[in-house]
Image (tube, rainbow, N blue to C red):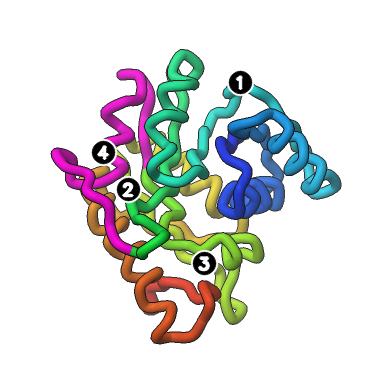
Amino acid sequence: MNVTVIGTGNMARAVATRALAGGHHVTLIGTHLSKAVDLADELTGEGPVRSSEEVDGDLVVLAVPFTHAPHAVRQHSSELAGRVVVDVTNPVDLSVLEPLDVAPFSSGAELIAAVVPADTAVAKAFNTTFAGTLMTGAVAGRPLDVFLAGDDADAKAAVAAFAEDGGLRPIDAGALARARELEALGYLHMAVQPALGTAFGSAMAVLS
């Protein structure tokens, strides 16, 4: 499938790497075209990747800081109709590592869902995986678990297939309302890093 990644930072690089590993076509969009060009050049050789200023993917991954996500959605609103937006963000102030207030919504994902076009599905996924581990797709030889939430079954199926193609294990967490718990889990994963001493190299997993 065609995957558009909005963002050019570490998480964007990691998502694009997994997409290319899964055999998908990747289009990168940055705040400046030059940043997208640079990242596309960096990923050349890993698969079909290009830079652009327009969304063209079946999946559109918001790989930007949470505070930038609503602006990115509004900027590309006219291009999102009929597509699936994948929110990988966590509403966290990284300067002090504290959650951001998303009231009156219960999660950042629901805030984003409120600003996308009416015929655009939103799925929460990848917010509990760190960029470094997502780049490799595994921790200690175990594929990463990718928790996902959303109200559109077809959209979740597409995101699950995307994760599986990249060598990951998708876990359906339910409706988009469950994004609240996924974002809390993402925040907890960040908050325990100093105590664990894992330098953002750990993973949240379900063992059975």
Relative vertical location of residue 164 with respect to residue 36 in this rendering, above or below: below
User: Along the horizontal axis of the image, is 187 left or right of 134?
Assistant: left
> Tag 4: Cα neighbours inside 10 Å, few (<14), some, or many (≥20)?
many
Relative vertical location of residue 55 with respect to residue 153 in this rendering, above or below: above
Q: Which residue is mark 1?
A: 54
Can residue 177 be seen in this snapshot?
yes
- The residue sitting at 51% across, 67% down in the picture is 144
Q: Which residue is mark 3?
A: 144
> Which residue, as the protein is rendered here, is positioned at the far front?
95
Q: Which residue is mark 2?
A: 149
Distance CA(mark 2)–CA(mark 3): 16 Å
Cβ–Cβ under 8 Å for marks 2 and 3: no
Give the x, y percent position of residue 15.
59, 50
Give residue 110's mark. Answer: 4
Q: Secondary structure at mark 1?
A: loop
Label 4 is placed on what type of residue? Glu
> Tag 2: Cα neighbours inside 10 Å, few (<14), some, or many (≥20)?
many
Can residue 2 be seen in this snapshot?
no
Distance CA(mark 4)–CA(mark 2): 11 Å
Distance CA(mark 1)–CA(mark 3): 30 Å
Cβ–Cβ under 8 Å for marks 1 and 3: no
Residues in magenta, as a range = 98-123
Give the x, y percent position of residue 56.
60, 23
